[in-house]
Amino acid sequence: MFKSQKYVFLNALILAVFIFGVGIALGYWFEGLRVAKINNLYTQAELNLLDIKILSDYTNYNISCENAIQNNIDFGNKVYEEAKILEDYENAERISESIKIQHYKYDLLRTLFFINSLKIKKQCNAGYHNIVYFYKYESPDLDTKAKQKVFSNILLELKRNQSNRIMLIPIAGDISFSSVKLLTQTYNITQLPTIMIDEKIKITDIESVQEIESLLR
Protein backbone atom coordinates (compact mmCIF):
# COMPACT_ATOMS: atom_id res chain seq x y z
CA MET A 1 0.00 0.00 0.00
CA PHE A 2 2.79 2.38 0.98
CA LYS A 3 4.78 1.56 -2.18
CA SER A 4 1.68 2.14 -4.31
CA GLN A 5 1.16 5.60 -2.80
CA LYS A 6 4.86 6.33 -3.27
CA TYR A 7 4.69 5.46 -6.97
CA VAL A 8 1.54 7.56 -7.41
CA PHE A 9 3.23 10.53 -5.76
CA LEU A 10 6.40 10.03 -7.83
CA ASN A 11 4.42 9.81 -11.06
CA ALA A 12 2.46 12.96 -10.14
CA LEU A 13 5.70 14.78 -9.38
CA ILE A 14 7.28 13.75 -12.68
CA LEU A 15 4.14 14.83 -14.56
CA ALA A 16 4.09 18.20 -12.75
CA VAL A 17 7.78 18.80 -13.52
CA PHE A 18 7.16 17.85 -17.16
CA ILE A 19 4.19 20.21 -17.51
CA PHE A 20 6.14 22.99 -15.80
CA GLY A 21 9.08 22.44 -18.15
CA VAL A 22 6.83 22.43 -21.21
CA GLY A 23 5.19 25.65 -19.99
CA ILE A 24 8.55 27.37 -19.64
CA ALA A 25 9.68 26.13 -23.05
CA LEU A 26 6.47 27.37 -24.69
CA GLY A 27 6.88 30.70 -22.92
CA TYR A 28 10.36 31.16 -24.35
CA TRP A 29 9.14 30.03 -27.77
CA PHE A 30 6.27 32.54 -27.85
CA GLU A 31 8.60 35.24 -26.51
CA GLY A 32 11.03 34.49 -29.34
CA LEU A 33 8.23 34.75 -31.89
CA ARG A 34 7.12 38.13 -30.50
CA VAL A 35 10.66 39.50 -30.48
CA ALA A 36 11.27 38.25 -34.04
CA LYS A 37 8.01 39.84 -35.22
CA ILE A 38 8.83 43.18 -33.59
CA ASN A 39 12.38 43.07 -34.92
CA ASN A 40 11.10 42.50 -38.47
CA LEU A 41 8.67 45.40 -38.12
CA TYR A 42 11.46 47.61 -36.78
CA THR A 43 13.83 46.71 -39.62
CA GLN A 44 11.18 47.56 -42.21
CA ALA A 45 10.34 50.81 -40.39
CA GLU A 46 14.02 51.72 -40.26
CA LEU A 47 14.36 51.21 -44.02
CA ASN A 48 11.22 53.27 -44.69
CA LEU A 49 12.48 56.10 -42.50
CA LEU A 50 15.83 56.07 -44.28
CA ASP A 51 13.93 56.31 -47.56
CA ILE A 52 11.88 59.37 -46.56
CA LYS A 53 14.93 60.96 -44.93
CA ILE A 54 16.73 60.74 -48.26
CA LEU A 55 13.67 62.28 -49.93
CA SER A 56 13.62 65.13 -47.43
CA ASP A 57 17.33 65.76 -48.01
CA TYR A 58 16.68 65.85 -51.74
CA THR A 59 14.13 68.64 -51.33
CA ASN A 60 17.16 70.93 -51.04
CA TYR A 61 17.74 70.13 -54.71
CA ASN A 62 14.19 70.92 -55.83
CA ILE A 63 12.94 67.33 -55.68
CA SER A 64 9.14 67.13 -55.27
CA CYS A 65 7.94 68.29 -51.86
CA GLU A 66 4.62 66.61 -52.61
CA ASN A 67 6.31 63.19 -52.68
CA ALA A 68 8.30 63.91 -49.52
CA ILE A 69 5.19 65.02 -47.62
CA GLN A 70 3.05 62.07 -48.76
CA ASN A 71 5.77 59.54 -47.92
CA ASN A 72 6.18 61.13 -44.51
CA ILE A 73 2.43 60.93 -43.89
CA ASP A 74 2.35 57.28 -44.96
CA PHE A 75 5.28 56.47 -42.68
CA GLY A 76 3.63 58.33 -39.81
CA ASN A 77 0.54 56.15 -40.20
CA LYS A 78 2.69 53.01 -40.11
CA VAL A 79 4.56 54.25 -37.06
CA TYR A 80 1.32 54.63 -35.14
CA GLU A 81 -0.06 51.25 -36.23
CA GLU A 82 3.18 49.54 -35.20
CA ALA A 83 3.13 51.36 -31.86
CA LYS A 84 -0.28 49.74 -31.19
CA ILE A 85 1.10 46.30 -32.12
CA LEU A 86 4.00 46.76 -29.72
CA GLU A 87 1.60 47.88 -26.98
CA ASP A 88 -0.53 44.76 -27.54
CA TYR A 89 2.53 42.54 -27.18
CA GLU A 90 3.55 44.29 -23.98
CA ASN A 91 0.04 44.07 -22.53
CA ALA A 92 -0.12 40.34 -23.27
CA GLU A 93 2.09 39.41 -20.32
CA ARG A 94 5.09 40.42 -18.24
CA ILE A 95 7.46 42.63 -20.23
CA SER A 96 10.79 40.87 -20.81
CA GLU A 97 14.14 42.55 -21.30
CA SER A 98 14.08 41.58 -25.00
CA ILE A 99 10.74 43.32 -25.54
CA LYS A 100 12.05 46.37 -23.65
CA ILE A 101 15.05 46.61 -25.97
CA GLN A 102 12.76 46.50 -29.00
CA HIS A 103 10.64 49.22 -27.40
CA TYR A 104 13.70 51.43 -26.88
CA LYS A 105 14.70 50.96 -30.52
CA TYR A 106 11.25 52.08 -31.64
CA ASP A 107 11.35 55.12 -29.36
CA LEU A 108 14.65 56.23 -30.87
CA LEU A 109 13.29 55.60 -34.37
CA ARG A 110 10.20 57.69 -33.60
CA THR A 111 12.40 60.45 -32.18
CA LEU A 112 14.33 60.53 -35.45
CA PHE A 113 11.03 60.52 -37.35
CA PHE A 114 9.82 63.54 -35.37
CA ILE A 115 13.01 65.45 -36.20
CA ASN A 116 12.63 64.54 -39.88
CA SER A 117 8.96 65.62 -39.82
CA LEU A 118 10.02 69.00 -38.48
CA LYS A 119 12.50 69.34 -41.33
CA ILE A 120 10.01 68.39 -44.06
CA LYS A 121 7.35 70.68 -42.60
CA LYS A 122 9.74 73.62 -42.62
CA GLN A 123 11.30 72.98 -46.04
CA CYS A 124 8.04 72.20 -47.81
CA ASN A 125 5.64 74.39 -45.81
CA ALA A 126 3.60 71.24 -45.12
CA GLY A 127 0.17 71.64 -43.58
CA TYR A 128 0.15 68.65 -41.26
CA HIS A 129 0.32 68.93 -37.47
CA ASN A 130 3.03 67.26 -35.42
CA ILE A 131 1.48 65.71 -32.30
CA VAL A 132 4.00 64.08 -29.99
CA TYR A 133 2.66 61.98 -27.13
CA PHE A 134 5.23 61.80 -24.33
CA TYR A 135 4.28 59.06 -21.87
CA LYS A 136 5.79 57.26 -18.89
CA TYR A 137 7.18 53.82 -19.73
CA GLU A 138 9.37 52.84 -16.78
CA SER A 139 7.15 51.52 -13.95
CA PRO A 140 4.17 53.91 -14.13
CA ASP A 141 1.92 53.84 -11.06
CA LEU A 142 -1.76 52.91 -11.29
CA ASP A 143 -2.97 56.52 -11.54
CA THR A 144 -0.52 57.23 -14.36
CA LYS A 145 -1.53 54.04 -16.18
CA ALA A 146 -5.19 55.03 -15.95
CA LYS A 147 -4.47 58.55 -17.20
CA GLN A 148 -2.35 57.26 -20.07
CA LYS A 149 -5.12 54.87 -21.07
CA VAL A 150 -7.48 57.86 -21.39
CA PHE A 151 -4.87 59.79 -23.40
CA SER A 152 -4.26 56.81 -25.70
CA ASN A 153 -7.97 56.32 -26.39
CA ILE A 154 -8.43 60.02 -27.18
CA LEU A 155 -5.42 60.05 -29.50
CA LEU A 156 -6.66 56.90 -31.23
CA GLU A 157 -9.98 58.62 -31.92
CA LEU A 158 -8.12 61.72 -33.10
CA LYS A 159 -6.05 59.63 -35.52
CA ARG A 160 -9.21 58.04 -36.91
CA ASN A 161 -10.87 61.44 -37.35
CA GLN A 162 -7.92 63.43 -38.69
CA SER A 163 -5.82 60.71 -40.38
CA ASN A 164 -3.45 62.46 -42.82
CA ARG A 165 -3.74 65.87 -41.16
CA ILE A 166 -1.62 64.82 -38.19
CA MET A 167 1.68 63.10 -37.44
CA LEU A 168 0.95 61.24 -34.22
CA ILE A 169 4.26 60.22 -32.66
CA PRO A 170 4.30 58.38 -29.30
CA ILE A 171 7.63 58.58 -27.42
CA ALA A 172 8.46 57.31 -23.94
CA GLY A 173 9.59 60.47 -22.18
CA ASP A 174 11.42 58.77 -19.32
CA ILE A 175 13.90 56.47 -21.07
CA SER A 176 17.58 57.19 -20.46
CA PHE A 177 18.80 58.01 -23.97
CA SER A 178 20.52 61.32 -24.67
CA SER A 179 18.39 62.16 -27.72
CA VAL A 180 15.11 61.67 -25.84
CA LYS A 181 16.41 63.59 -22.82
CA LEU A 182 17.45 66.46 -25.09
CA LEU A 183 14.02 66.43 -26.73
CA THR A 184 12.15 66.64 -23.41
CA GLN A 185 14.52 69.35 -22.16
CA THR A 186 14.25 71.38 -25.38
CA TYR A 187 10.45 71.46 -25.18
CA ASN A 188 10.36 71.62 -21.38
CA ILE A 189 8.42 68.39 -20.89
CA THR A 190 8.31 68.11 -17.11
CA GLN A 191 5.18 66.00 -16.62
CA LEU A 192 4.18 62.63 -18.07
CA PRO A 193 1.96 62.07 -19.90
CA THR A 194 2.04 65.21 -22.04
CA ILE A 195 0.65 65.80 -25.53
CA MET A 196 2.62 68.39 -27.51
CA ILE A 197 1.01 70.01 -30.57
CA ASP A 198 3.16 71.73 -33.19
CA GLU A 199 6.02 72.18 -30.70
CA LYS A 200 4.09 74.96 -28.93
CA ILE A 201 0.97 73.69 -27.17
CA LYS A 202 1.36 71.23 -24.29
CA ILE A 203 -1.57 69.33 -22.79
CA THR A 204 -1.30 67.50 -19.49
CA ASP A 205 -5.03 67.05 -18.78
CA ILE A 206 -7.71 66.23 -21.31
CA GLU A 207 -11.16 64.64 -21.33
CA SER A 208 -12.25 64.53 -24.98
CA VAL A 209 -10.90 64.47 -28.51
CA GLN A 210 -12.85 67.66 -29.28
CA GLU A 211 -10.46 69.62 -27.06
CA ILE A 212 -7.54 68.75 -29.34
CA GLU A 213 -9.54 69.18 -32.54
CA SER A 214 -10.49 72.69 -31.49
CA LEU A 215 -6.79 73.53 -31.15
CA LEU A 216 -6.05 72.14 -34.62
CA ARG A 217 -8.54 74.52 -36.23
Image (cartoon, rainbow, N blue to C red):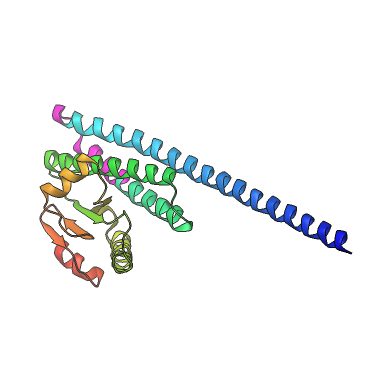
Q: In screen coordinates, is 75 left or right of 30?
A: left
Q: Is residue 131 positioned above or below 39 on the image?
A: below
Q: Quadrant of the N terminus?
A: bottom right
Write the start and end of the magenta stretch as one range: 60-75
Q: Quadrant of the C terminus?
A: bottom left
Residue 202 lies in quadrant = bottom left
Q: Residue furthest front?
A: 2
Q: In screen coordinates, is 73 left or right of 196?
A: right
Horizontal and vertical percent position of residue 151: 28, 65
Residue 63 painted magenta: yes
> Which residue is pictured at 18% across the width and 45% down the height?
181
> Which residue is pictured at 42% across the width and 41% down the height?
41
Q: In screen coordinates, is 24 left or right of 18?
A: left
Residue toward you, 148 or 156: 148
Residue toward you, 40 or 138: 138
> Which residue is pictured at 68% across the width and 52% down the height?
17
Can residue 39 be seen from the camera position used here?
Answer: yes
Residue toward you, 104 or 75: 104
Q: Main secondary structure of the magenta part?
A: helix
Can residue 217 be seen from the camera position used here?
Answer: no
Residue 209 painted magenta: no
Q: In screen coordinates, is 122 left or right of 113?
A: left
Q: Is residue 31 positioned above or below 93 on the image?
A: above
Horizontal and vertical percent position of residue 186: 11, 47
